[in-house]
Amino acid sequence: MADVEPPVAGRRTFADVFAAPQPLPEVEVVLRPPKIIEGEICFIFSAEETEATARPFRFSIVLKFLRQRPSLDSIRSFISSRWGLSCCPVVSAMQNSRNVFIRMSKEEDFNKALSRESCEINGVCYRPFAWSPDYTEEYESPCVPVWVFLPGLPPHFYHASVLKMITAPIGKFIRRDNPTTCATRTDGARICLEVDASRDPITHFWLGCPGLPHSRRQEVVYETLPAYCCNCHQQGHNSKTCRIGKDHTKKGTGNQVWVKK
């Protein structure tokens, strides 16, 4: 019988890639009867219970495809071969047929998946969103991953702890790119942040007291910042160009009664 070659260290085997998903860790919630409010049956959970039940999904993202998505098997195969994750994620369908739920077990994989610059799978583009307990498929979250460049930032500010601090007013730190991590490019720092697209972007900040000779006015350059509409809660346009907003305006105008003075 031929000898079976042992797996090479660091190389994932077929069994590793397509390992069966494990059951969720059970979270015990205190059993209690429902409440009746205005004749409706309802269950109310505390913030602590919500946090505990959501903990297994804290490194999950939602991919919202812009047209008919590839099959789940195609998505799993693409992620396994292209995303470079340390562990195989759980890929599952959602109520909306264009959406896919990606559950990872490590924060490093989560950050890598959320900050991918090429947002397409087999030629079908998608929008990534970090999942949270208040996520809903009807609306798109205004918080989106955005690559930001800080031109001319001195290299001694490239440490992750420093970048997290100075970019906190802009958005939530996800990761640095490799040239910034290794300081092989020193014309500025490039960082991926989770930015609230519904707010006016911060265009600059100061390192040191504003206006002093040894202080630095740091410019912020957004590589891609999608428009966001607060009327319909969708990306791709703003409130001024929203069809829903225009419809409301037309209806409002039609109901006006002009009185001659």
Image: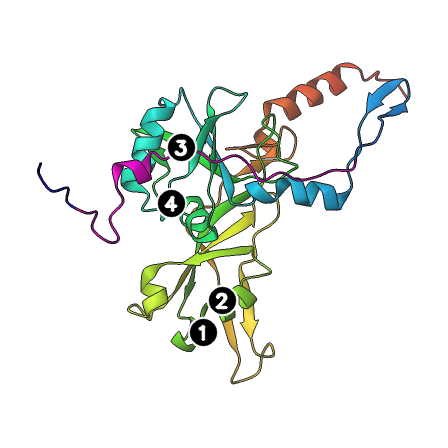
Q: How far apart are marks 1 and 4 (CA)?
A: 31 Å
Number of the front mark, 1 or 4:
4
Which circle's residue, 3 or 4, is located before the other in the chain? 3
- Specify few, some or many for label 4: CA neighbours under 10 Å numbering under 14, 14-19, or 20 or more: some
Q: How far apart are marks 2 and 4 (CA)?
A: 27 Å
Type of amino acid under label 2: Leu
Q: Distance between the residues labelled 1 and 2?
A: 7 Å
Number of the front mark, 2 or 3:
3
**Residue at which label 3 appears:** 20
Q: What residue is drawn where x is 28% and y is 41%?
A: 82
Colour option used: rainbow
Which circle's residue, 1 or 2, is located before the other in the chain? 1
Q: Do the residues labelled 2 and 4 touch (CB within 8 Å)?
A: no
Type of amino acid under label 4: Cys
Q: Viewed as shown, does residue 220 lie left or right of 48?
A: left
Type of amino acid under label 3: Ala
Q: Do the residues labelled 1 and 4 touch (CB within 8 Å)?
A: no
Instruction: Give the magenta part as a residue range.
Output: 6-30
- Specify few, some or many for label 1: CA neighbours under 10 Å numbering under 14, 14-19, or 20 or more: some
Residue 219: image x %, image y %? 48, 64
Q: Do the residues labelled 1 and 2 touch (CB within 8 Å)?
A: yes
Number of the front mark, 3 or 4:
3
**Residue at which label 2 appears:** 163
Q: Residue 87 carries which label?
A: 4
Q: Residue 157 carries which label?
A: 1
Q: In which quarter of the image is the N terminus?
A: top left
Which circle's residue, 2 or 3, is located before the other in the chain? 3
Which circle's residue, 1 or 4, is located before the other in the chain? 4
Q: What residue is drawn where x is 37% and y is 40%?
A: 88
